[in-house]
Amino acid sequence: MARLPIVMLGADILRQKAEAVPTPGPELDRLVADMFETMYDAHGIGLAAPQIGRSERLIVLDVKEDEATPMALLNPVVVESGGGKDRVEEGCLSIPGVTASVERPYTCVVEATDAKGQPVRIEAQGMLARCLQHEIDHLDGVLFTDRISPIKRKMVLAKYRKLAEK
Ligand SMILES: [Zn+2]
């Protein structure tokens, strides 16, 4: 396994819609293992392929609520969401050092295939639902800073730039 470099805010790939869906097989297994290593090493709970420089519809996550629950999903789609709006502080491995309170639906249902190509349906709530929505946003070129007010965004990005300069 190998740690991969994480792409930072400002890179075009973070703003592109990922079109390609990876094909299950040994190469994908290796990529998924590397993405998990990269995510755990950075103390993250989710990582999307564009964040490691690949424009592909692939995410990994592990929200570790009670015990480790690693998940790798190909072509994940939010098919339902609800449960009322929920506000929680979010961060992103591509925008390190800053967080902001982001409003998202409390529950969602995601359909995808797993890394072996088997269909999966996940009924999620709370942190898992939030993490899934955040990572799936990455596949469409959307960042959490797009989901906060313009004033808050300005503050968060100014703070990030200041930290990035150091
Ligand atoms: Zn992120």
Image (cartoon, rainbow, N blue to C red):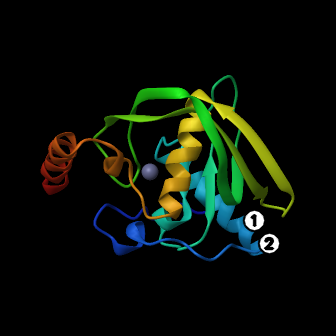
Q: Residue at x 63, y 77 (%)?
A: 20
Exactly how many numbered labels are in the figure?
Answer: 2
Which labelled disc corresponds to residue 98?
Answer: none
In the orientation shown, which residue stands out farthest toward the top? Answer: 66
Q: Which residue is mark 1?
A: 29
Residue plotted at (55% across, 64% down): 49
Task: State the CA–CA distance, disc 2 to disc 1.
Answer: 5 Å
Mark 2 is surrounded, within 10 Å at the Cα level, by few (under 14), some (14 to 19) or many (20 or more) other residues, namely few
Label 1: which secondary element: helix
If the image is split into quadrants, where does the N terminus sit?
A: bottom right
Q: Amino acid at mark 1?
A: Asp
* Residue denoted by label 2: 26
The three-letter code of the residue at mark 2 reads: Pro
Question: Would you say 88 lies left or right of 69 here?
Answer: left
User: Where 6 sits versus 97, above or below?
Assistant: below
Residue 117 percent coordinates (x, y): 84, 64
Dot 1 beta carbon under 8 Å from ligand 1: no
Q: Quadrant of residue 56?
A: bottom right
